Amino acid sequence: MTLRPSRLLAAVVLLLFSAAGVQAQDQAQDQTQPAAPPPAGGPLAGVNVLQISVAPLSADSQRCGLQQDLVLESFQQPLIAEGLSVQRSAHVRIVVTATTVVYEGGTCISTIGAMATQNTRYFDRQTQVERAGQVLMWSDSGLFVTGERDHVVLTNIGFRDLARSFVRKWQLDQ
């Protein structure tokens, strides 16, 4: 079936008018409906105090220059700069991890991560028992592949970036 130029032109004009009508309808709807209110806080709303712990580092992590004190300092620096308090005990706990493998030739490969959890307790009506657990509130991770010499510097920057990711989520939830 071949379309004649006049039919083709009519089809194009019809499509244009249809699209213009839908667009005008959408604009009219936008003007009559009020904007939806922003969501009322997220899981990190109201959190101002954190507990941070660093998981034990393997021999390969230490060989590549990672140290628990440096990891902790790198991670908590952006949090403190934002006004969050870091204490030994808090309702929200962040566990920072680093898993490192040394590949042939002195190449360090590290997966770093952080996970914020909150302890929770509730009463299970079916079993008539109080239960406890943890709720995941946020997590993020990254991968770094470098030579032994540069690895500690780049992964410490990565730990700061993970903390900044937490801060962005925290700010959104407030």
Image (cartoon, helix red, strand yellow):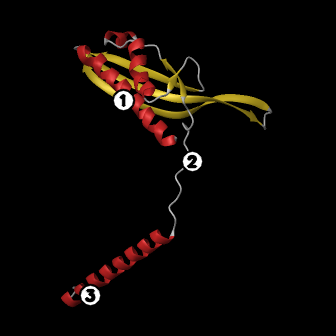
Q: Give the labeled residue for mark 3.
A: 10
Distance from the alpha carbon under mark 1 to that under mark 3:
57 Å
Q: Give the labeled residue for mark 2.
A: 40
Spot occupied by residue 5 in the image (x, y as percentages of width and height): 19, 87
Crowding at dot 1, Cα within 10 Å, few <14 / some 14-19 / many 20+, comes out as some
Distance from the alpha carbon under mark 1 to that under mark 2:
26 Å
Which residue is at 36% across, 10% downward? Answer: 62
- Quick one: SS at disc 1? helix
Which kind of residue does numbered mark 3 sit on?
Answer: Ala
Mark whose residue sits in front, 1 or 2: 2
- Quick one: SS at disc 3? helix
Which residue is at 38% across, 20% downward? Answer: 74
Spot occupied by residue 111 in the image (x, y as percentages of width and height): 37, 24
Q: Is there any visible trace of residue 166 in the rendered image? A: yes
Residue 166, picture quadrant: top left
Question: Residue 65 shows which numbered tag?
Answer: none
Which kind of residue does numbered mark 2 sit on?
Answer: Ala
Spot occupied by residue 23 in the image (x, y as percentages of width and height): 38, 74
Q: Is residue 55 above or below residue 164?
A: above
Which kind of residue does numbered mark 1 sit on?
Answer: Asp
User: CB atoms at circles 2 and 3 under 8 Å apart?
Assistant: no
Left or right: residue 34 versus residue 141 is right
Residue 68, picture quadrant: top left
Q: Give the labeled residue for mark 1.
A: 161
